[in-house]
Image (cartoon, rainbow, N blue to C red):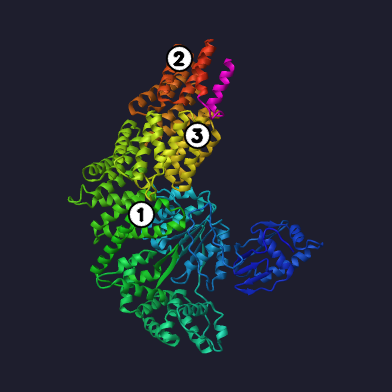
Amino acid sequence: MTTTGIQAKDRLSFGPFHLAAGERLLTREGAPVELGSRALDILVVLTAAPNEVVSKKELMSRVWPDIVVEEGSLRFHMTGLRKALGDGKGGARYITTLPGRGYCFVAPVSRLNSSRDEVPFIAAGFPHANLPNRLSRVVGRAEDVLKLSVQLNASRFVTIVGAGGVGKTTVAIAVGHHLIEAFSGAVLFVDLGMIGDPGLVTTAVASMLGLTVQTEDATPNLIAYLRNKRILLILDTCEHLVDAVAPLASSIVDAASQVYILATSREALRVQGEHIYRLDALAFPPDEPGLTAAIVQTFPATQLFVERAVAGGARLDVGDAEALVIASICRKLDGVALSIELAARRVESYGLQQTAALLDQRLTLLWLGSRTAPPRQQTLQATLDWSFGLLTDLERVVLRRLAVFVGHFTLDAALEVVTSATLDRSTVLGAMDSLVAKSIVATRPVGAMMRYRLLDTTRAYVLDIRTDDAEAADLAVRHAAYYRRWLEQTGIEWPSLATGEERAPHFAAINNVRAALEWCFDDGGNADIGVGLATAVAPVFLAMSLLPECHRWSERAILAFDDAARGGLDEMHLQAALGVSFMFMRGGRDRARVALERSLAIAEERGDPLDRVRLLGPLNMFHLRTGNFATALEFARRCSATAATLDDSVASALAHSILGISLHLRGDLAEARAELEAALDRGPRSQRTTTIYLGFEGKILARAILARNLWLQGHPDQAMAHARQAVEEAAAMDHSLTLAIALIWAISVFLWTGDLKSAEAYIDMLIARAESHSMTPYLLVGRGFKSEVAIRHGDAKSGVEGLRTSLQKLHEAPYELLTTPLNLSLVGGLSAIGQVDEAIALIDEARGQVEKNGDQLYLPELLRMKGSLLLQSERNRDEAAAYLMQALELSRSQRARAWELRTAIDMATLMARRREADSARELLQPVVEHFVEGLDTADVKAAEHLLATLR
């Protein structure tokens, strides 16, 4: 039989089963399942379309293609198939009958390759996917994985609850791999064991999704981002953060109907919608006579023991006598996976019998004490005590020092931090190898580098062991100093990291930085070390869009300065970071300006030219955002002059970008174009980008402004191409602030060209991104653009109301960068609803502001609209003509062909009304002839139509 939807070479996996369609073989945990030919055909058809209803008619036609059969035959073979799968037993569900419709295969299905290895799933549309590799064989958990998958599919929110060391994380990762195709690869694994501050739970999730964090509470923008996403979110190790995780998980489940949450915790989160899955310890043999090796090795606890012992180098020939010893060990350890692994790793050193004897002595001694803890937690505590007692003094010292690390760490980090005057590198390296061999330290490859980690239970145990205060302080200083060096060497790489897998090591390192900062600024810490660490991490926080943390630690470090430290380079960098983070978090407040100006003052007194460039750029952006365009241009010119003395491609790109936008807004289009094109010149490659200075990528801003510049200069097609490219580059960069900036300027191009379809698509993208990232000014601008589109579609009344609301809130921010173009849109709306006098008054007010602030780019359009409104109100046509002539002259002086064309259309219309058709044609014709592209854009088409009427 041939089936469609599944190829002969395909292998599928569901629950504990593997289906090889080409080999016509179904196996359960490697053992063949006896299944009739027709039942196997039914299974192949159903698994080819999981979660889809296959009608009885279609099923019969594909299983029995050449003969006619009754439904009874289908029911008979379906019953046999369900029995073979164990459908309905222990909560496992595979095939559902839908009365009157057919059958549906409901268990999650994963596709494997022909070599029986799983194909790594790459989520093209979800670059943040970061699910850790699962073990090649997860012992005794196949049914748990299947049941959890079914329960998660049905309820969307499941917490795996179990004692420490029972294997919750291992099972959660296995479930993630089991469901990865069902979620198209969109699986995010959040290791909360690396987080100590409950206030950082939401920030951790948001930052791993690439979101900009601009407020202390990132929950609203996280919810907004997740609202229309289908994602499996695995929240691992929640027990120490339950009060923070519980409301977050509940909010996500309520607001985002396609987000599924799988949590692991020693206790339930206890919120609405949560379903509990209690993960028991591994089954172990009972204490009864007649046990043989064959029987003992059918239990997962003993299987795990043997596998780990052999993996540790032990020579283990398991006969009946040995099997009884292994069974006894597993019983005493209550089937706790971590305890079993720790014990099994000792067999290579002590042999099976001696391992059992040592373990028995230790457990007996400990169990004579308090028995108030839950039994399995007593077992784990006892096993850790026993394991720690078997370590050499050297290994204990190294283990205690490794506990300073939060989450994963590299071998280089361990050697730098653990090594001291009494422990050289080779000694530490040998001890670490031994700790790995004994399963005390876990390893996991990340990319080309091996990462190390103490399991949370092990780390908590070690941290409870008292150490000398001086030794602990010395260790904390080395830990903080190492991560400062790491930040200085690799922190600038962040903007170039595109995937969750690439960013995972940086998240682990940043969590160590957070822990070090907490220690430095806490009682008994070292504030001097903290200042240096905060200085190093500030640009990384900016690049990661973690603005509240950048603001918090910069401010904390500045407050820690003594008189001797004030005015130094550290204060310069921290004031800059404080100013930029505050500018994007709170808008154009004086506090941001004061911090930036303080930083610049230090740079001019003590810093080098590169430091001045780094500060002149943010000051330029601050004044642009607050509408002080003339002041912004002064800072841009100073930045350009300083950058010209440097041989630094990033500084050059930054200077060209900000000078280009400042000249553009002043109306110096030719000079602006030269600067913007220079900014886009690739130059020597550098890992640094302007993201670490400005909080966004300056080259993408340059391209977006160049698009506007080209439209104004009479090149509509080139303008639209650059606008689209700017958005595409920003989206590929996956940096939300950069994308929002690219969208704002690109939208203006499409509104100018009359391509409302593209404008609306980008407006929707801008609003969605700004809402999900709490970028309030960009959200307000997006809504203002949407109101302009409403006016153009004929809904002028609601458009006017929307623009008024947006402008009012932008004034309050304050965010005045786009006040004039939004006022122009409002003028058009007021005109459309007949409020001409109010429109004229608004134009006069806007002209006054332009003359004062310096965004003279818009002056020709303001003059043109004033003349057009005067014509509309049937007032003095000579006065209207005078305004139009002023607009025409000014647009020509700016060489703004687009403004000139619009004005020429209005002036020619006025001339036509005066019966001066020849003069009108003589005015308009040469202007239109300048346009050799963009012939389908709104203004060019309007001009061509008017010329046709004048002939």
Disc with the residue nearer the chain's start (3 vs 2): 3
Q: Position of residue 320 (x, y in %)?
A: 53, 88
| Residue 798 visible, this orientation | no
Image mark for residue 718: 3
Look at discs 3 and 2 and give the one toward the viewer: 3
SS for dot 1: helix
Image mark for residue 491: 1
Q: Position of residue 943 (x, y in %)?
A: 54, 22
Q: Position of residue 175 (x, y in %)?
A: 53, 64
- Which residue occupies the foreground of this view, 348 or 769? 348
- Which residue occupies the foreground of this view, 546 or 949? 949
Q: In which quarter of the image is the C terminus?
A: top right
Horizontally, is 53 left or right of 468 in the view? right
Q: Where is residue 72 in the image (x, y as percent from the top left)?
A: 78, 65
The amino acid beneath tag 2 is Ala
**Other residues around mark 1 within 10 Å, as few (<14) / some (14–19) / many (≥20):** many
Spatial CA distance of label 3 from label 1 is 36 Å
The amino acid beneath tag 1 is Gly
Residue position for label 2: 881
Residue found at x 33% / y 41%: 618
Horizontally, is 361 left or right of 109 in the view? left
Residue 867 in the image: above or below residue 372? above
Residue found at x 60% / y 64%: 113
Disc with the residue nearer the chain's start (2 vs 1): 1
